[in-house]
Structures are given as structure tokens and as C-alpha cells.
Image: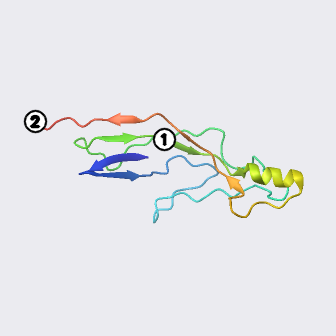
Amino acid sequence: VKVWLDGDTAKEQVFDVALSDGRVVDPASGRAPRLPSTVDLEQGTYEDRVGAAELTAYWQDPAFNPRQSAVYYLRVLEIETPRWTTLMAARTGLPRPQTTAATVQERAWSSPIWYRAQASR
């Protein structure tokens, strides 16, 4: 994820870089297709058969401007798992709440990488 200022406006751009399961970024949208969910909503279980335990990649900002300060950070998405309310409904036999999502997708973030532009000479 790249964050920068355009005047007084904060801008953000997400780059999908490292993908599992042979997925590739859609050239039209610039985004990766979602992984299929393995969650069984009735049983409150999931199968850990999609995704990857480890991803590595080399990435270079295609719009890098040495005169533009920016912040970069990495974000990783976990596969979908049952939300706690789905687990409780499966264990108790009660219906799942219809006002909340049945699954969650946890995220992890890296520390920010700050790039400070050099002053023009």
C-alpha cells in the first residue's frame, strides 16, 4: 500500500503483489481475484487448503517519483474463517445472527517504510 499527499489531500493506492494458488492480477482492474471460501457455515469449520503459508516477492513502485514523499506498508490477508458468532451458532444449534457477517478475514500489517523526498537543488 502506498500513501502520499497530493497538495492537502491524502492519496492511497493498493498494489496486489504476491498471490497464492496460481492467481494473477487482473490487468483491467489491477486487483487479484479472491480465494474461494472453504468455510462451512452450518458446521462452523473451514479447511486450510487454499492460500499459502509463506509469500515472497520483489516489488518496485511503478510510479515512483524521487521528489514525492511517500509511505509504504505491506498488508497480508488471511483466508476466510468462521466469525465467532458462526462458531457459537454451530455449537449451540441456534441460528446465526443475520446482522453480522458469518466469516472474517484477518489482516496483518508491516511497519511503515517512509520515503522522504530530497529537496530540489
**Image location (x, y in percent) of residue 58:** 46, 40
**Image location (x, y in percent) of residue 18:** 53, 46
Task: Please name the residue shown 32% across and 46% down the image.
Answer: 4
**Residue in the foreground of this view, choosing between 5 and 2:** 5
Residue 44 appears in the figure: no
Does 4 sit left or right of 59 as displayed? left
Q: Quadrant of residue 120?
A: top left
Name the secondary structure under disc 1: loop
Does 34 sit left or right of 17 as displayed? right
Find residue 121 and name its label.
2
Name the secondary structure under disc 2: loop
Q: Which comes sooner in the sequence, label 1 or label 2?
A: 1
CB under 8 Å between discs 1 and 2:
no
Residue 89 appears in the figure: yes
Q: Residues within 10 Å of mark 2 (few under 14, many from 20)?
A: few
Find residue 74 and name its label.
1
Separation (CA) of disc 1 from disc 2:
32 Å
107 in relation to 22, above or below? above
Task: Please name the residue shown 54% across and 38% down the image.
Answer: 56
**Image location (x, y in percent) of residue 110:** 50, 36
57 in relation to 82, above or below? above
**Residue in the foreground of this view, choosing between 8 and 13:** 8
Task: Please name the residue shown 87% across and 50% down the image.
Answer: 91
Amino acid carrying mark 1 in the image: Leu
Amino acid carrying mark 2 in the image: Arg
Q: Residues within 10 Å of mark 1 (few under 14, many from 20)?
A: some
Q: Quadrant of residue 76?
A: top right
